[in-house]
Amino acid sequence: PKVAQSFFGGRKMAAWGDFLSAARIEVGSEDHECSDERGIYATCSRLVQQELDRVQQKYQLDSTRVILAGYSQGAACALQCVAEYPKPLAGCIAISGWLLPAARIPAATRSFWLFHGREDVQVSVNCSSFAAEKLRQFGAKVRPP
């Protein structure tokens, strides 16, 4: 969806949430710790969950045969969606993303694949390391090890 971006003076652009800063996302940064006051990530998470339900119903799929994936801000949204989704999925793939505060809860989904380039200039690799550590604390299986 087109979302008004705080760091762009409210200019609308395709996004899963509100970027609060143009700075690189690091563990502890404003965007990494986003409380989602405007509810944009939460709304996107609900929309993705509705689509997951629709696809499962349309194709008669068990949720444990579905994998949700996202890249960058989409990875942050995918991780939040999986954390809030009541049914277990086969897994979640997050590429160059981060774990938003709302996603720092135990999830029904137990398998995660996190990938991140060490030279990423937009989102620090420490964000994926932080996400892996938190997910493991909740008993999730995170790959690569």
Image (cartoon, helix red, strand yellow):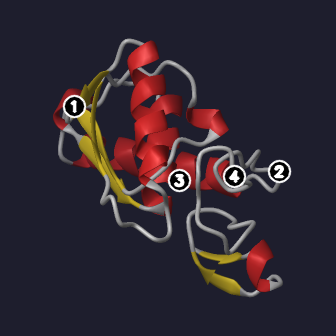
Whole-angstrom CA distance, mark 4 to mark 1, is 31 Å
Q: CA distance from mark 3 to mark 2?
A: 18 Å
Residue at mark 4? 29
- Relative height, residue 98 to residue 106 (above, below): below
Q: State the separation of the CA atoms marked 4 and 3.
A: 26 Å
- One can see residue 144 in this view: yes
Q: Looking at this view, name the residue that lies furthest to the front.
A: 119
Give how far across and how far down residue 73 sits, in percent: 50, 61
Say which residue label 1 marks.
90
Q: Is residue 18 left or right of residue 50?
A: right
Tag 3 near tag 2, CB within 8 Å: no
Label 4 crowding class (10 Å Cα cut-off): few <14, some 14-19, many 20+?
A: some
Residue 78 in view here? no
Give the Cα distance between marks 2 and 1. Answer: 30 Å
Whole-angstrom CA distance, mark 4 to mark 2, is 16 Å
Earlier sequence position, callout 4 versus callout 2: 4
Tag 4 and tag 2, C-beta contact below 8 Å: no
When the figure is inspected, residue 87 is found, relative to residue 138, above or below; the finding is below
Kind of residue indicated by mark 2: Glu
Q: From the viewer's perspective, is the residue at label 4 or at label 1 nearer?
A: 4
Q: Nearer the viewer, mark 3 or mark 2?
A: 2
Q: Quadrant of residue 70?
A: bottom left
For label 3, the SS is: helix
- Whichever of labels 4 and 1 marks the residue nearer the N terminus, that label is 4
* Residue behind mark 3: 47
Residue pictured at 66% horizontal, 70% vertical = 23
Per the image, label 2 sits on a secondary structure element best described as loop
- Element at label 4: loop
Q: Earlier in the sequence, mark 3 or mark 2?
A: 2
Task: Compute the Cα span from label 3 to label 1.
Answer: 19 Å
Give the amino acid type for the residue marked by disc 3 in the picture.
Answer: Leu
Amino acid type shown at disc 1: Ala
